[in-house]
Image (spheres, grey):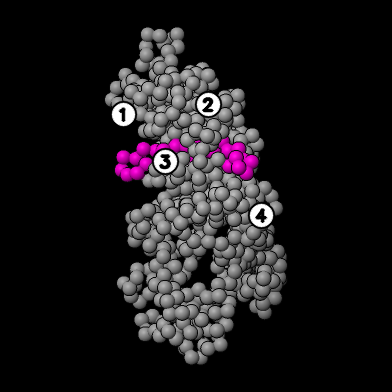
Amino acid sequence: MRTAFKNWGKGIIALLLGLMACSSPDQQANDPTKPAQEPNQNYTRRRVVVSDSLFRGRILDRYDSVLVATRPQYLLKLPRRAPLDTLALGQLLGWDSTTVRKRITDALPYGKASTGYQVQLSLTAAEVKRVRRDSAAWPKLTLVARPRRAYTTGAGAPVLGYTGPEAQSFFRQARRTGRGRFYRLRNGGVETYYNGLLTGHWGYLHPQLDEKGQQHGTWARDTAFQQGQDLHLTIDIKLQAYAEKLLGGRKGYLVALDPRTGEILAYVSAPVYPAATITAPDQAGVRNQLLEHEDMPLLNRPAMLANPPGSVFKLVNAAVALQLGAITTGTAFRCDQSLVSCVHRHPAAKSLTAGLKYSCNPYFYQVMRNLINRVPDSLAQDSAAARHGNLALWRRYARSFGLDSALGVDVAREAPGFLPTPAYYDKARRTRFWTYRSVYSLSLGQGEINLTGLQMANVAAIVANRGWYFTPHLVRGIGKGGPLPRFTQKHHTLIDSVHFAALVPGMVAVMQRGGTADASSLADVGITVAGKTGTVQNDQGDDHAAFIGFAPADNPKIAVAVYIENAGFGATAAAPCAVLVMEKYLRGSIAPRRKRWEARIQRRARRE
């Protein structure tokens, strides 16, 4: 295939031979760096660009399956405004009448209002043969071929992204909406992030020619053309496609990564759409629907959308409280409903493990209260100063998880999330004498706390690793080398590893009998999952469902974060999706007892 492309590339280079810059002999003579010339001989300087757009680097998954490559694309251009016999066109292409109408509708950016718009239909090699065979009967149809990025999969749209030149039609459509600049800046995926490496570098030749076209040395140093490098992604494309089926048309995200390396295994932003939609010439109508859709499917949710994490944040609060001595693993608190409501009945939480197992809201209300209301001896007479100092210390330790700042993942415009400061509450409460009662929502991962999906998954990886992480990333290899250097640097939190180890029994208990996600256990296939559910209160509709976890609990190989908007309880909506992805990755298949469960989730994802 690449040998055929080289001949095409030669034609491109030949066209570029016309680029030249002329100079007089006097100018050349005055430049001692240029080769000597024969007396009275005028030379023409040329600058030849050596490039080949067909050889932009490929994008492959972690198992070297090609996901994106530059290939010739065949387009059939239909006549503008001319009457068209769709039945005959379908017979020409081997399509039924329904397919013809749908393909044309998908290609029109604004439906029937697209007056005068020239429809271009992408054809397969077999369809091209049919058109060429009967071209004489269709003089108004134009068949063109040009190199374009070809997607071998429909999965991973926000990961793969698009090249700017091929997305110009999308940009023009986007400018007609209020989201135009937003999408242009933030949705390019690895195609945009690693554009310079994928493209390579143009080469330049500088021949000096006489009147007969004979070369007489060069007038400047030549530079070599550098082939674009392949990108080897961390993504498992089969796992990615499976995870997308679980979320489908629902609003939310799923991020799965290998905690040992920070490599992202699956990255789903839902509602999902086919990867080629943004650049396909015959998908203008579909793009317009995506731009106008109320659920904003083009929003790259795991990186750009920061939400309150809900009860999954209790893991962070517990780790900080243990580190600062606000509690111990044996600390017991009464489930006091007068402090804050607990949405389900459960036995008293006589330890941290039990508090996590039951996700007891009053328990963690009191954990955070102990932390914020601690009064050091030096501040014994100033409780307001103590609260300010304790909140600032809590924030410092929480930020060491990679929160309240961009992680540095290889995606564009990653949101930083937010952790409140004492100064923030001074301004919001209009007094520096605010009390714990006015900020207690922090104990439940609500209120002012906001985390992205990437940060949520990274929190799971940190607990899995007992306190450290590699920055999550999408590219594990560039050309024949490894990832960018920053993705091989290990980051440590400010929490001792022993305190993370203390969280794991409670996370394992969450998935066992009596735990908040006991229905999602994988014990039947010998996999011990450690997890934490979250139900995020939403004043504008149904609650959001959240879950983070990792497996196997004693030797973690996959960490997952799931967030589904307006889906209700994390235990019933988010946890099942997460454990199915874990099982699929670790075993390669889903056990028969969960097949009906899997089918029900996928049906709901398609329906929404």
Badge nearest the viewer, 3 or 4 = 3
Residue 30 visible in the snapshot: no
For the residues labelled 3 and 4, say whether their Cβ atoms are less than 8 Å apart. no
Q: Position of residue 478 (x, y in %)?
A: 65, 52
C-alpha separation, residue under disc 2 versus residue under disc 1 = 35 Å
Magenta span contains residue 539: yes
Name of the residue lying farthest toward the bottom:
136
For label 1, the crowd category at 10 Å Cα-Cα, with few meaning under 14, some 14 to 19 and many 20 or more, is few
Give the SS element for disc 4. loop
Label pair 3/1, CB-CB below 8 angstroms: no
Q: CA distance from mark 1 to mark 4?
A: 51 Å
Q: Which residues are magenta?
A: 522-551
Q: Does residue 131 lie above or below 396 as drawn?
A: below
Image position of 479 with respect to 312: above or below: below
Residue highlighted by disc 2: 353
- Seen in the picture, residue 67 relative to 356 is either above or below; the reply is below
**Amino acid at pointer 4:** Tyr
Instruction: Identify the amino acid type marked 2.
Output: Thr
Image location of residue 579, percent across then percent down: 55, 44
Q: How far, Cα to Cα, is label 3 from label 1?
A: 30 Å
Q: Which residue is mark 1?
A: 428
Q: Nearer the viewer, mark 3 or mark 1?
A: 3
- Tag 4 or tag 2, which sits nearer the N-term? 4
Q: Earlier in the sequence, mark 2 or mark 3?
A: 2
Mark 4, residue position? 63
The residue under label 3 is 569
Indicate which disc, 3 or 1, sits on the residue closer to the N terminus.
1
Q: Nearer the viewer, residue 317 or 177?
A: 317
Q: In whole angstroms, how far apart are the C-alphas of marks 2 and 3?
A: 21 Å
Callout 3, which amino acid? Phe
